[in-house]
Image (cartoon, helix red, strand yellow):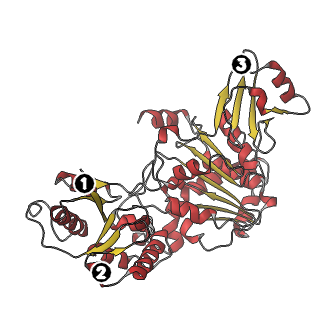
Amino acid sequence: MPRKKNLMVLDTNVILHDSKCIHQFKTSDISLPIPVLEELDQFKKGNESINFHAREFTRSLDSLSGDNIFNGGIKIGKGLGKITISLDREIHEDLVQSFSPNKNDHRILNIAYHLSKEHTSKNVILISKDVNLRMKAKSVGLKAENYRNDQVRDIATLYNGHRTFENIDSGLFEQLFNCVAYFDADALKNGTKLNPNEYLILRNGTQSALGMFDGESNQVRRVEKPTAYKIKPRNVEQTFALDALLNKNIQLVTVSGKAGTGKTLLALAAALQERRHYRQIFMARPVVPLSNKDIGFLPGDIQSKLDPYMNPLYDNLGVMQMMEEKESKAKNITQLLEEEKLVISALSYIRGRSLVKVFFIVDEAQNLTPHEVKTIITRAGEGTKIVFTGDVFQIDHPYLDSHTNGLSYLIEKMKGQKLYAHINLEKGERSELAEIASDLL
């Protein structure tokens, strides 16, 4: 019996997530409900990632367009299926009792349901990043799936940037702690392939050391406990993170971990420590409202609207200023802010700026899409270092999760690159109370 062909019905949020999504479904046919085009029209103006995707998709659709797009469909490309636009229908009798036709989500659901009844020879599947719409579809027997083209398959096996080796030969410790401070990685003799800039905890019964694998020289070098702007690491993972943040040869660093592990503070401390090597320090984070109202509903000018979202960055800056006061240098950070050598802003206001010789810290990166992460990194100019921090399990974005957010995707894809290092911070250092709350609540 021949396998049924798929007919994918796309929701608007899929296109706003990836404007090239229609090229990702191989030989499957695609249906584009007319309410989706109406919603895309509302997103075409603006500088956010979703506005870019709306414009890009509309242009690509226009290049394919013709009369057949409403009748039979148009071939998307070689080896791909067809795309067609589906017009509104009267709400199906099976749905009329449960779903109001006044909501665009219900109009899309209704079109998909009609198509499933009309195309019984095909697998009609509603593709949406909205979990509620997917649940509604499944409640009426309609197949529904998340858009998973750029997701991390198994978050449990996500690269954490370091590993432990036991029963290390005493001679290797001697090499690490003499004037050479390194040994050949082949001496580990365990057959395990190490990633460039992967950090190591080395132990035997009586000795221990911290190391980092240099992929170019195939050597393990000793890692000392660094200090940055009077901030000292409190645990092994923080030591590794600060080493990577201060390493001029590592141009891209990701630091993940739950709240209170010190991600942002370490990144800021490293930036201030190394500021003489950079033209500017940028600190930015995406603006993701936790309610259904965006920043336009907040009072005041644009800076007043953004301040509530930027406060966590200022909190970390306050810690650094306290360290300065102890050293009678309290004017340093204030002067950097006044001279715009240190800039704190929403991520959308960083876009378009030149990233040459910039130490760029992107906080809360788990609320970025993979495309947004790519957009940021591809703007890196000569002498720029980019640091992404975040918690892949604390997602505020309505259409992202631990598998599909940009930070998880970046960690998965960049593993093994010589210019990249990652560390997952595991131990909370904010306070004992914060640690207990993070673990239990």
Disc marking residue 68: 2
Residue sitting farthest toward the top = 205
Vertical comparison of 186 with 37: above or below: above
Pointers 3 and 1 in contact (C-beta within 8 Å): no
Query: Which callout, 2 or 3, points at the residue further toward the start of the chain?
Result: 2
Camera-side residue of 368 and 118:
118
Q: Judge whether residue 73 can be spotted in this image.
A: yes
Q: Judge whether residue 285 can be spotted in this image.
A: no
User: How far across and down, in percent of the image, does residue 327 sit?
Assistant: 79, 48
Instruction: Identify the residue at horizontal 74%, vertical 37% (top origin).
Output: 212
Q: Which residue is denoted by mark 3 in the rendering?
A: 167
Give the Cα distance between marks 1 and 2: 26 Å
Vertical comparison of 107 with 396: above or below: below
Looking at the figure, which quarter contains the C terminus?
top left
Query: Which callout, 3 or 1, points at the residue further toward the start of the chain?
Result: 1
Instruction: Identify the residue at horizontal 51%, vertical 67% (top origin).
Output: 306
Relative to 267, is 302 on the left or the right? Answer: left
Give the Cα distance between marks 3 and 1: 53 Å
Q: Residues within 10 Å of mark 2 (few under 14, many from 20)?
A: some
Residue sitting farthest toward the right = 179
Q: Which residue is denoted by mark 1 in the rendering?
A: 143
Q: Amino acid at mark 3?
A: Asn
Q: Amino acid at mark 2?
A: Asn
Vertical comparison of 79 with 87: above or below: above
Give the Cα distance between marks 2 and 3: 69 Å
**Label 3 SS:** loop
Q: Residues within 10 Å of mark 1 (few under 14, many from 20)?
A: some
**Label 2 SS:** helix
